[in-house]
Amino acid sequence: MPVTKKVFVKTFGCQMNVYDSERMSEQLASHGYSETQEIEAADLVVLNTCHIREKAVEKVYSDLGKVRDVKAGRLARGLSTQVVVAGCVAQAEGAEISARAPVVDVVIGSQSYHRLPELLAKSRNDGGRIVETRFPDEEKFALLPDRRIEAGTGPRTSAAASAFLTVQEGCDKFCTFCVVPYTRGAEYSRSVAELVAETERLVARGTREITLLGQNVNGYHGEGPDGAVWSLARLIRRLAEIEGVERLRYMTSHPRDMADDLIAAHRDERKLMPFLHLPVQSGSDRILAAMNRKHTAQDYLTLLDRIRAARPDIAVSTDIIVGFPGETDKDFAATLDLVRGIDCAQAYSFKYSPRPGTPAAKLEAQVPESVKAARLTELQALLDSQQTRFNASCVGRTLPVLFERKGRHEGQLVGRSPYLQLVHAEARSELLGRIIPVEIAAAGQNSLAGVISAA
Ligand code: SAH
Ligand code: SF4
Ligand code: F3S
């Protein structure tokens, strides 16, 4: 038996990082590592990082300061600790990380995770620091071990009712504010066969809901079993045929890739949930052009009309950036107008953060921080009111809820509605992993509460 070592994984950023962390944890499990939630107990610390905004990066460096203390404390007790920085900061900053935080043993970019055990061994044997940030020719997903079916050793590897599945990675769109094309590289779609196989394994361990992930997931164009290029809609229809798959979702989409067959899938495919995260970023056509989004505010609204005609109850979510360089009060007013026109069920909003190497960071007309903050506050008040109103509109309805975890109170479970709302209900723990009708009795800004309908 190999000696069991412990790994502590902390994930920053988007769902793709959550997925990558799961894959790394499972891979490390097959090399004798079990997961721990206590960093002091960890022989290996992995920070899976995000580069999207400056704050996300600062958090990583402040965490590395804490990791340094933990490593020193363990060393005083005669224990060694390896420290890995993975993800988008690793990809973007590479050797700079080792220079700023000598505590780090291995810096590994997002496309090299299949090499993590090998790099850990190399660093242990040579005692040196390793920086691996190439975009390798080989494909990491094909080289990572298959998804585990047996119950795992930690929270991320255990059977989960809802799981992420990366189907597409990277981005060729180059929005002028965004680092993703640089940190994740060129657009790549996994093959249908690989995704069917992985879905079957997820279902075998109890997963009922799968969220298909991609930086531009609706731009998916993977190789089908017939050798043809398949669209996301076709992939969704194929995965929906798998017994045990009860719900499918996808994120994040780009408005320009909302193909007709995908809109039709929202009309026809029962397992495809009526929820769409479709970032718009701004309501000003001038700013949208400067962002290189290649659509107007009206294009977006027209598209939503078509989607809502196909699936009238669809809940729409979006992302918005305030304070992009050159954004005037008038531009911002156009954003507020667009948000009123969209009527969001949910949304994320951010202050523009200049990112090194992106075109927008070099623009002269940067918006002062105080203006960004004021605009964000105003926008969030509007978005919060829309979200509260949407949640309130569900009261009195009976919604199918997939129970995912225990709630904070004894006897309570927490799940998700089709519209991705959190729903709390009194329920026996046998109902975990099952979809149960719940009559919604109360709604708040961030969640619903209900009672299980009498059969
Ligand atoms: N691929 C997705 C989103 C990627 S990043 C898409 O194309 O929409 C997630 C969100 O972060 C973006 O939608 C955007 O709203 C926000 N974001 C990206 N770069 C940013 C920056 N430099 N400053 C502030 N927010 C940013
Ligand atoms: Fe970034 Fe734009 Fe690509 Fe989305 S589409 S990942 S915002 S460059
Ligand atoms: Fe962040 Fe990388 Fe995701 S920059 S948002 S972790 S793709």
Image: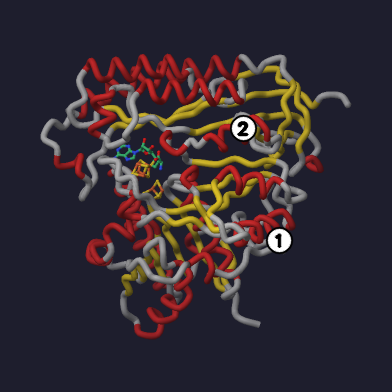
Q: Where residue 378 sits: x, y (%)?
A: 34, 17
Q: Where residue 369 sits: x, y (%)?
A: 21, 29
Q: Which residue is mark 1?
A: 151
Mark positioned earlier in the residue sequence (2 or 1): 1
Who's the residue at 29% across and 57% down the image?
92
Q: Where residue 6 sits: x, y (%)?
A: 54, 68
The image quadrant of residue 99 is bottom left
286 on left or right of 279 = left
Who's the residue at 54% across and 61% down the image?
23
Nearer the observer: mark 2 or 1; the answer is 2
Q: Nearer the viewer, residue 423 or 306?
A: 306
Q: Is residue 231 visible?
A: yes
Amino acid type, residue under disc 2 in the picture: His
Rendered image: mark on residue 266: 2
CB under 8 Å between callouts 2 and 1? no
Amino acid type, residue under disc 1 in the picture: Ala
Who's the residue at 49% across and 42% down the image?
218
The secondary structure type at the circle numbered 2 is helix
Circle 1: is it few (<14), some (14-19), or many (20+) Cα within 10 Å? few
Residue lying at the far left of the rendered structure? 364
